[in-house]
Image (cartoon, rainbow, N blue to C red):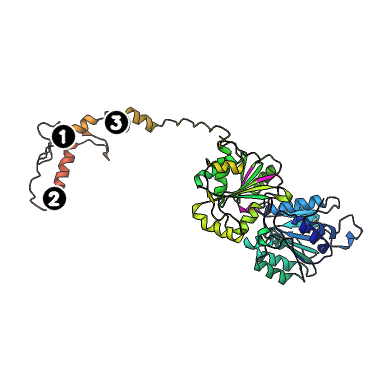
């Protein structure tokens, strides 16, 4: 088995206990580059000198920016250190404290966690990191982007100065360099690649399409039926978008699930587990999952919207083509995002300055992605629409002949109303000789007593005369 470049270059240095900064593109085995030295330099319970160290206190601490990445690192360490019997605990927010507190009380050797929950446990005095011999900051640039830098510095201040510090990241912003200079002792800088344009997986084919937002689900549904389509991750900009796209794909017949911050942690872990175990084919995720998903067999990564910047683009498409495998990355660019994409394209020195306008029926889409002619964006028939239940209002309309009697139906009581309108008014407001006698009605009367339309008309005429100011001219006789 041949190690990756970052592993080959860091293992010998890290095993000596030297501080180091490791920089390499995503998906090239950084986890084992620091995991193996941490496991080797930790003392297992069955070792002779285990009694000489503080019992049950963590010997190593690994800080990760997201829950998903913390779980991935913890699983890798548990698998690699199984023979040594080292106890690995993962701590993160979104779940209860009880199980984590109980495990810490029983004793652990290596703790992997997110900054917020680590500080919470330290404040509760349930976690003591004052004896760790190794501290690892994984995906340090992501922690900077998420605003965790103050928390990381606080965690560093709780650990002994004699610790070994290892910092791993795909990119190295100025703030991370400053952090390294402040908290690391003569670190060795190891860079597996020398330029930014090689931070992307070389075996990943990239396609950039200028697409209309309403047509994107149809395009994705057809790509899912391509010849080499396996498991697919769709990245969206917002949580609502992720939920909507996942629901749309499910309605079209595909096994899809969302993964975003509004979901409960249990639901997020369940979706990821099903995705890893091939029980789920499509994962629609926000960037919260861009760093934490290390799943074999991801054939396609689809950017539903243009990424915010070049770093986001690199980390998203790094979910495919991992560990030497090939992959396909598809990015949809809206017309409003053309300027943003051109900046990403220029920064990464990519040849896609003018994305090709693409629709679900475009021939080049079928050719690029290996989609069979005639493929449609649905593998099940749409669910039949349940007939709408007829309401009392609908029945009332039907009885009156359509829309309230306007479509030729006779209005209820319409004859009486027309006779009232055609009636000739006199000066006193009483009906003329040809009109019908006043009709008594109690409808709308507050006290339930009968009143007549004639009285109502007289009252109206009185108001007209009084508003005219004194002896107004008699009201003109109107012929309807």
The answer to the question of whether label 3 and label 2 lie on touching residues, with beta carbons closer than 8 A, is no
- Nearer the observer: mark 3 or 2; the answer is 3
Real-space Cα separation, disc 2 to disc 1, in angstroms: 26 Å
- Measured from the top left, where is residue 169 in percent x and y? 70, 61
Look at the image and give the residue range highlighted in magenta: 282-299
Q: Secondary structure at mark 3?
A: loop
In percent of width and height, residue 314 lies at 64, 56
Residue in front for this viewpoint, 412 or 428: 412
Q: Residues within 10 Å of mark 3 (few under 14, many from 20)?
A: few
Separation of disc 1 and disc 3 at Cα? Answer: 22 Å
Would residue 353 be visible to someone looking at this image?
yes
Left or right: 85 in relation to 224: right
Whether residue 126 appears in this view of the structure is no
Q: Secondary structure at mark 1?
A: loop
* Label 3 sits on residue: 407
Please tell me in which quadrant of the rendered image residue 413 appears.
Answer: top left
Residue 466 is labelled as 2
Q: Give the x, y percent position of residue 212.
A: 50, 47
Do tag 2 and tag 1 residues touch (Cβ < 8 Å)? no
Residue sitting nearer the eye, 208 or 125: 208
- Residue position for label 1: 422
Task: Quadrant for the C terminus, please.
Answer: top left
Q: Nearer the viewer, residue 138 or 454?
A: 138
Measuring 34% from the left and 31% from the top, which residue is drawn there? 397
Q: Quadrant of residue 66?
A: bottom right
Considering depth in this image, is 453 or 154 the residue closer to the camera? Answer: 154
Labels 3 and 2: the sequence-earlier one: 3
């Amino acid at each position: 088995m041949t190690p990756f470049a970052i592993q080959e270059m860091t293992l010998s240095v890290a095993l000596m206990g030297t501080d180091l900064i490791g920089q390499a593109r995503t998906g090239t085995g950084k986890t084992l580059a620091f995991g193996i030295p941490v496991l080797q330099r930790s003392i297992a319970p069955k070792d002779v000198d285990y009694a000489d160290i503080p019992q049950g206190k963590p010997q190593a601490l690994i800080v990760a920016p997201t829950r998903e990445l913390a779980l991935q690192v913890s699983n890798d360490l548990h698998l690699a250190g199984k023979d040594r019997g080292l106890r690995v605990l993962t701590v993160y927010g979104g779940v209860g404290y009880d199980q984590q507190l109980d495990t810490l009380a029983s004793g652990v050797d290596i703790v992997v966690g997110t900054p917020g929950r680590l500080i919470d446990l330290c404040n509760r005095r349930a976690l003591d990191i004052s004896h760790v011999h190794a501290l690892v900051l994984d995906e340090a640039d992501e922690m900077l982007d998420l605003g965790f830098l103050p928390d990381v510095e606080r965690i560093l201040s709780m650990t002994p100065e004699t610790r070994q510090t290892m910092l791993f990241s795909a990119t190295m912003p100025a703030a991370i360099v400053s952090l390294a200079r402040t908290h690391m002792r003569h670190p060795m800088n190891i860079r597996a690649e020398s330029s930014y344009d090689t931070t992307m997986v070389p075996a990943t084919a990239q396609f950039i399409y200028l697409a209309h937002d309403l047509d994107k689900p149809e395009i994705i549904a057809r790509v899912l039926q391509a010849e080499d389509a396996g498991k697919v991750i769709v990245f969206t900009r917002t949580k609502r978008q992720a939920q909507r796209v996942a629901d749309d794909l499910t309605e079209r017949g595909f096994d899809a699930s969302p993964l975003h911050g509004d979901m409960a942690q249990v639901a997020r872990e369940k979706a990821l587990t099903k995705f890893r175990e091939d029980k789920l084919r499509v994962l629609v995720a926000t960037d919260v999952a861009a760093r934490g998903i290390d799943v074999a067999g991801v054939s396609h990564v689809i950017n539903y919207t243009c990424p915010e910047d070049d770093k986001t683009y690199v980390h998203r498409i790094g979910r495919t083509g991992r560990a030497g495998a090939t992959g396909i990355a598809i990015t949809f660019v809206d017309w409003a995002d053309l300027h943003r994409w051109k900046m990403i394209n220029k920064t990464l020195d990519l040849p896609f300055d003018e994305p090709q306008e693409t629709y679900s029926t475009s021939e080049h889409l079928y050719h690029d992605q290996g989609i069979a002619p005639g493929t449609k964006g649905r593998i099940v028939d749409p669910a039949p629409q349940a007939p709408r239940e007829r309401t009392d209002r609908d029945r009332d309309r039907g009885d009156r002949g359509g829309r309230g009697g306007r479509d030729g139906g006779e209005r209820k009581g319409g004859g009486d109303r027309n006779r009232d309108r055609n009636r000739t008014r006199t000066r006193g407001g009483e009906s003329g000789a040809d009109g019908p006698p006043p009709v008594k009605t109690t409808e709308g009367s507050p006290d339930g007593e009968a009143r007549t339309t004639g009285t109502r008309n007289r009252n109206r005429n009185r108001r007209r005369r009084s508003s005219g100011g004194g002896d107004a001219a008699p009201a003109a006789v109107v012929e309807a």
